Image (spheres, helix red, strand yellow):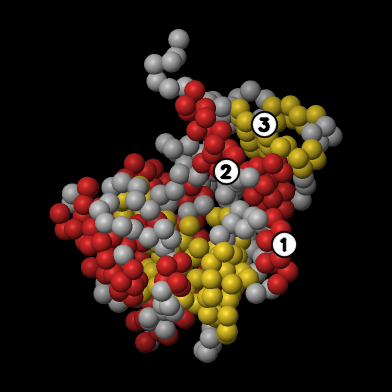
């Protein structure tokens, strides 16, 4: 029927180019978190693909990634058509990666509508996720000039996440609100207020737009960025890709410039696997206990503890509380859970400090 015809223009794009340093030392520059099996049976990337696969045809799922990670993407999702891996030749920001995807899709299908999905989230229930995807796409099909994002009601005051303040309810069958502003990673006190006010949703960063409409907006906001992406696609010259000023956020600039952006509500059980405390939260909910581990581990009398052991050497913990222990072949990290919850970039800084200590040529 006519509905099927519309759905032929629906695409999902997994963004898998991130470096994920807050999950160091498991997540590293060479193998970031989305390629690791941290929760469940498969890597976060493969889980994300499987979750989308029941709602989209295989040739309508794309992965945007850094060129260096493309072989891992193909390895973990062998079913993915070669042309559906969109490779960034060099890192030049998320908005530019979106522009590259939008240009690529527009050439393939001028009526393309795409839903951007992160490669490193944990979702409680696939059906709810699919419903969120399709209602968001329904909304954009009904409002082709508008961007939309999936918003989730906050369950706790999380300072590691982005929040969205909404305005009036928008007309139509889909429950959607006008997006008034984005609030990135608030302070503890602000997060408590935002959650209490009930005017804010968590930003899942599942964004949906028509490829054409997004490119139109980007052409107004950052013409040089779109031009450079087009030049890169037509010439294949890597250097062309990063020319011109970009945007510091893939969607925030649209809101500021008055483009219509809507938030579609969802009761998704959603966790951003951004940090060790978030992994502890997911695993302890799943296993219904406060000491959780992966790998060889023995514990007595601890609570609120996460142990991830990637080596064959057993880790023994006794009487710990609020502690994260991560053991890999290249580093051992022992940290207070609440300290890295409160300042998530602390681990990134430690990883950088360690890299500086071990500069090439220093090894004896």
What is the residue that sits farthest to the left in this orientation?
235
The disc at residue 192 is 1
The circle drawn on residue 345 is: 2
In the image, what residue occupies the spot 57% across and 85% down?
169
Q: Tell whether 291 sits left or right of 242.
A: right
Q: Residue at x 38, y 77 (%)?
A: 7
Nearest to N terminus: mark 3 or mark 1: 1
Tell me the CA gap for discs 3 and 1.
Answer: 28 Å
Mark 2, secondary structure of its residue: loop
Label 1 to label 2: alpha-carbon separation: 20 Å
Q: Are marks 2 and 3 in contact (CB under 8 Å)?
A: no
Q: Quadrant of the N terminus?
A: bottom left
Rate crowding at label 1 as few (under 14), some (14 to 19) or many (20 or more) other CA atoms within 10 Å.
some
Q: Nearer the viewer, mark 3 or mark 1?
A: 1
Element marked by disc 1:
helix
Above or below for 51 versus 38: below
Q: Quadrant of the C terminus?
A: top left
Is residue 86 or residue 314 the one in the foreground?
86
Q: Quadrant of residue 112?
A: bottom left
Q: Which residue is mark 3?
A: 334
2 vs 3, front mark = 2
Residue 29 position, x and y percent, is 44, 38
- The tag earlier along the polypeptide, 2 or 3, is 3
- For residue 242, say whether it is visible: yes
């Amino acid at each position: 029927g006519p509905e099927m015809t519309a759905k032929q223009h629906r695409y999902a794009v997994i963004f898998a180019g991130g470096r994920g340093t807050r999950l160091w030392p498991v997540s590293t520059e060479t193998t970031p978190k989305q390629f690791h099996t941290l929760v469940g049976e498969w890597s976060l990337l493969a889980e994300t693909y499987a979750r989308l696969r029941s709602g989209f045809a295989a040739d309508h799922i794309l992965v945007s990634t850094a060129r260096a990670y493309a072989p891992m993407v193909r390895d973990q999702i062998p079913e993915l058509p070669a042309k559906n891996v969109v490779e960034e030749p060099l890192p030049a920001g998320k908005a530019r990666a979106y522009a590259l995807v939008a240009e690529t899709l527009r050439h393939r299908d001028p009526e393309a509508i795409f839903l951007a999905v992160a490669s490193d989230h944990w979702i409680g229930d696939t059906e709810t996720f699919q419903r969120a995807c399709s209602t968001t796409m329904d909304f954009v099909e009904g409002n082709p000039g508008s961007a939309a994002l999936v918003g989730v009601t906050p369950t706790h005051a999380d300072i590691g996440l982005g929040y969205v303040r909404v305005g009036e309810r928008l007309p139509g069958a889909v429950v959607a609100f006008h997006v008034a502003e984005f609030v990135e990673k608030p302070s503890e006190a602000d997060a408590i207020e935002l959650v209490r006010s009930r005017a804010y949703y968590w930003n899942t960063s599942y964004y949906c737009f028509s490829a054409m409409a997004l490119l139109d907006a980007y052409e107004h906001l950052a013409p040089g960025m779109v031009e450079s992406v087009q030049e890169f696609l037509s010439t294949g010259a890597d250097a062309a890709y990063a020319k011109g000023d970009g945007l510091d956020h893939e969607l925030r600039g649209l809101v500021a410039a008055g483009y219509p952006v809507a938030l579609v509500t969802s009761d998704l059980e959603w966790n951003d696997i951004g940090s060790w405390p978030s992994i502890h939260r997911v695993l302890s909910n799943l296993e219904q206990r406060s000491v959780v581990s992966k790998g060889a581990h023995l514990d007595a009398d601890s609570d609120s503890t996460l142990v991830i052991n990637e080596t064959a050497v057993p880790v023994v913990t006794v009487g710990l509380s609020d502690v994260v222990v991560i053991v890999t072949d290249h580093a051992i990290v022992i940290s207070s859970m609440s300290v890295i919850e409160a300042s998530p970039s602390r681990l990134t800084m430690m990883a950088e400090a360690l890299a500086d200590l071990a500069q090439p040529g220093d090894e004896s």
